[in-house]
Image (cartoon, rainbow, N blue to C red):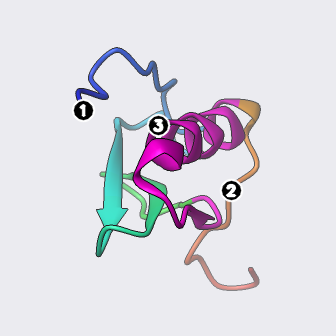
Amino acid sequence: MDLSDISLQDCPICGGAAAMFEEGGWAFTIQCCDCGAQTAIATYSKPEDRRKAAESAAYTWNLGKVTSPSPGE
């Protein structure tokens, strides 16, 4: 299933590019390629829910709901 049509905004912390990662075939997370900020994990248990989980992770990212590995986070 192609997920390339899911749009990701630039990082809300540093403005860097974002990338979507699939975690072992059960979850998605979005991470900044520059500062390492990331979303919470969006899980799925059935193959038919895979796209919905990817869209959920992207939606969370695009809202700016991220954690940062910076000190004090």
Q: Closer to us: mark 3 or mark 2?
A: 3
Does the segment drawn in magenta span residue 69?
Answer: no
Q: Which residue is mark 2?
A: 66
Q: Amino acid at mark 1?
A: Met
Q: Amino acid at mark 3?
A: Arg
Based on the displayed image, in which of its 4 quarters is residue 23 positioned? bottom left
As rendered, which of 15 and 18 lies closer to the eye?
Answer: 18
Q: Closer to us: mark 1 or mark 2?
A: 1
Q: Which residue is mark 1?
A: 1
Q: What x and y, as percent, mark residue 14?
A: 52, 43
Quick check: marks 1 and 2 in contact, CB under 8 Å? no
- Mark 2 surroundings: few (<14), some (14-19) or many (≥20) residues within 10 A: some
- Side (left or right) of 7 relative to 21: right
State which region is magenta: 39-62
Q: Is residue 39 above or below residue 60?
A: below
As rendered, which of 15 and 19 lies closer to the eye?
Answer: 19
Q: Which residue is mark 3?
A: 51
Point 42% across, 64% down: residue: 36
- Mark 1 surroundings: few (<14), some (14-19) or many (≥20) residues within 10 A: few
| Label total for image | 3
Q: What x and y, as percent, mark residue 49?
A: 53, 46
